[in-house]
Image (cartoon, rainbow, N blue to C red):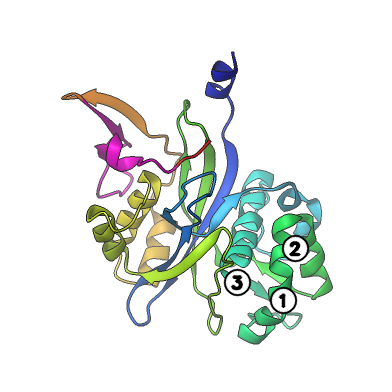
Amino acid sequence: MAEAEEFHTPPAPAATVLLLRDEPVFEVLMIERHENSAFAGGALVFPGGRVDPGDRLAEWAELADGLSDDPVFAAAEVAAIREAFEEVGVLLARDEKGEPIGADRVQSLNSHRQLVEKDDSLFLELIRRENLRLACDALTLFAHWIAPPGLHRRFDTHFFAASFPDGQRVLEDGNEATEAVWIEPAAALAARKAGRRKIIFPTACNLGLLTCSPNVGEAISWAREREIRPITPAAEKRGGKIILQIPDGLGYPVTEEPLDLARPDLSRS
């Protein structure tokens, strides 16, 4: 009975952000998750995580620029910004003058990261107390993936893209994120193919999508132009192997691969 209930459990809402820069070359910020993480332990991922109750608070409408009118999407926007702050010390926000905050301002908030991680409701309190506003208008929807039924942990994840804020610095939390790396999308995929990095299927597919653009501006512009709809991978048995597939026509250069490559042993009980 427990297994049947787990099979039908709705996916948990989640959000992640692809922080992009052009210097020295077109790169994306990724983190290596702690080996003992409940999901994707040891994998290279984009900063992100579950949408928490504090991300859904109505008060965010007064503390965010460009926040969506859709409450589900708005909560994902807040979660993506909060998770980037918690995991890599990057905060997409503006000060009381409407200017993007820089390294010194973010550094002054560093001691609050673990507190926010333990109690997500403190994020709103922090933003309000510091007279800041979240820069939700800096986020562009990049992809939307929903894990298929039958997995131990299922997520309904909005992937956002954003230009890395000028002047800020990356500082992994050392807890969920044990390493933060700037990496070219193609180099990340090459490391995966060579077995030097663990990267799960949705992450690899979105890295592949990034390889189609030469720079940050074009990656974000294309995301705004192309069709983005929820993707749920499907499994097909072929030649004695299980193949994971996603629909054609959504811009992804790779739309299928064997399950043993797509989903290595990254999920723990």
Measured from the top left, where is residue 93 in percent x and y?
66, 72
223 or 75, which is in the foreground? 75
- Rendered image: mark on residue 109: 1
205 or 35, which is in the foreground? 35
N-terminal label among 2 and 3: 3
Look at 60% across and 42% down and name the residue there: 13
Whether the magenta-drawn stretch holds residue 80 is answered as no
Measured from the top left, where is residue 7 in percent x and y?
52, 22
Give the structural element (helix, strand or loop) at label 3.
Answer: loop
Q: Report the residue that reaches farthest toward the left.
A: 239
Inspect this view and state whether residue 248 appears.
no
Reading the image, the residue beneath label 3 is: 89
Look at label 3 and name its amino acid. Answer: Gly
- Side of 58 relative to 55 (left or right): right
Q: Quadrant of residue 262?
A: top left
- Rendered image: mark on residue 115: 2
- Side of 111 relative to 183 (left or right): right
N-terminal label among 1 and 2: 1
